[in-house]
Amino acid sequence: MSSDDWQFDTLALRAGRVISPEGEHSEAIFPTSSFVFSSAEEAAARFAGDEPGNIYSRFTNPTVAAFERRLAVLEGGERCVATASGMAAILSTCLGLLKSGDHLLAATQLFGSTVNLFDKYLTRWGIEVSYVDVTDLARWQAEIRPNTRMLFIETPSNPLMEIGDIQGLAELAHAQDALLVVDNCFCTPALQQPLALGADVVVHSATKFLDGQGRCIGGAVVGDSQLVGEEVFGFLRSAGPSMSPFNAWVFLKGIETLGLRMVAQCTAAEQLAVWLSAHPAVSRVYYPGLATHPQHELAKQQQRAFGAIVSFEVVGGREAAWQVINSTEMLSITANLGDVKTTITHPATTTHGRLSDEGRERAGIHQNLMRVAVGLEDLNDIKADLQRGLDQLPR
Ligand SMILES: *Cc1c(COP(=O)(O)O)cnc(C)c1O
């Protein structure tokens, strides 16, 4: 059986490995800024691109390359470019693939820093930006302009778990000679492969589920050899938002257990969503696995499971939400997600705190909303930790 036939969990452990002459079983870390050449001729040939090989770790490092090969295989893309952070992946994608005068049509439901990057910085370079509800396919069609060159979504979105129709949006984009970029952070390739559904580029914050244990900041861009292998790589090589070899190694180790973690964390999240829905102090639960979720059917079609994030609103306002958060004794009050330790966040005052009040309301992020990223603790302990605060609330 050849590696072409391997299934996801096998690829997550073994794709992209290159064993050095030392015969190491676990991938080696190469903490070196540059690489030596055997001759001036070899150096010249490598710099000219006439001969493959390592040059300088801003754009060629064997540990980073192993991470890139593995994630490319898992996403079903030809090439992956690793970056210093998820935000660096989004920046590299936009600056590598857009130019002044282009229009970027983005989902309203985006990570807060992504909106800041688009509104405050991309617009400075003459890129027009506008927003559409990720769930409203007909609106996307209407908002496309003659100069629209990129559609950008997250699905499921953070923190409300709204679902965008990847196949439908890809068709719209391609009819307009535009690209569809999908931030696949919440699903990871273990649950969803946007490229197979027609997306052109996938971006990641490796910081989240790919690491899985909240250790390192990193990101990645995956796509074909032209868009990612030439354009995004060219930007990275010149601009330098590169991933460190150590971080690449941590992400490689994280990816080895990705499938197993996602299954366990999604199962627990699904059960937690059902449990929260039944609590009288909980007024609304946002989880695509619930039959009451407006895009439950779409999520079922394009995802293998519904994700490890559950957001919910309580009866009351900010005080009520903060009381639930402050009554926890085990859950980590932190903005990160995708960790094996369960985390709880108040999006309106943290991850989405820099949005205007109006922008936040438009995005549906209310003061009584909390986001839980479910980890691997015993589910009964997670429930008990949330129940302490919930039981104190008026209902
Ligand atoms: C965290 C996050 C990012 C940004 O990634 P960093 O690694 O923090 O730079 C982008 N998109 C989504 C959906 C995220 O959750």
Image (cartoon, rainbow, N blue to C red):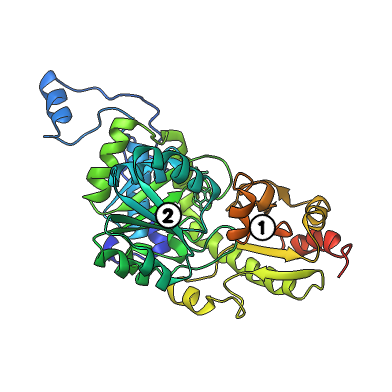
Which secondary structure, mark 2?
strand
Badge 2 crowding class, 10 Å Cα cut-off, few under 14, some 14 to 19, many 20 or more, is: some
Percent across and percent down for residue 368 are 74, 59
Residue at 40 percent of width and 60 percent of height: 10
Whether residues under marks 1 and 2 lie with C-beta atoms below 8 angstroms apart, the answer is no
Q: Position of residue 314 (x, y in %)?
A: 77, 65
> For this rendering, which residue is in front, 160 or 363?
363
- Choose between 287 and 266: the one closer to the eye: 287
**Residue underneath mark 2:** 130
Location of residue 183 (image quadrant): bottom left
User: Tag 1: Cα neighbours inside 10 Å, few (<14), some, or many (≥20)?
Assistant: many
Q: Secondary structure at mark 1?
A: strand
CA separation in Å, label 1 and label 2: 26 Å
For marks 1 and 2, the one nearer the N-term is 2
**Residue 264 appears in which quarter of the rendering?**
bottom right
**Residue 189 in the image: x percent, y percent?**
42, 60
Q: Which residue is mark 1?
A: 371
* Three-letter residue code for mark 1: Arg
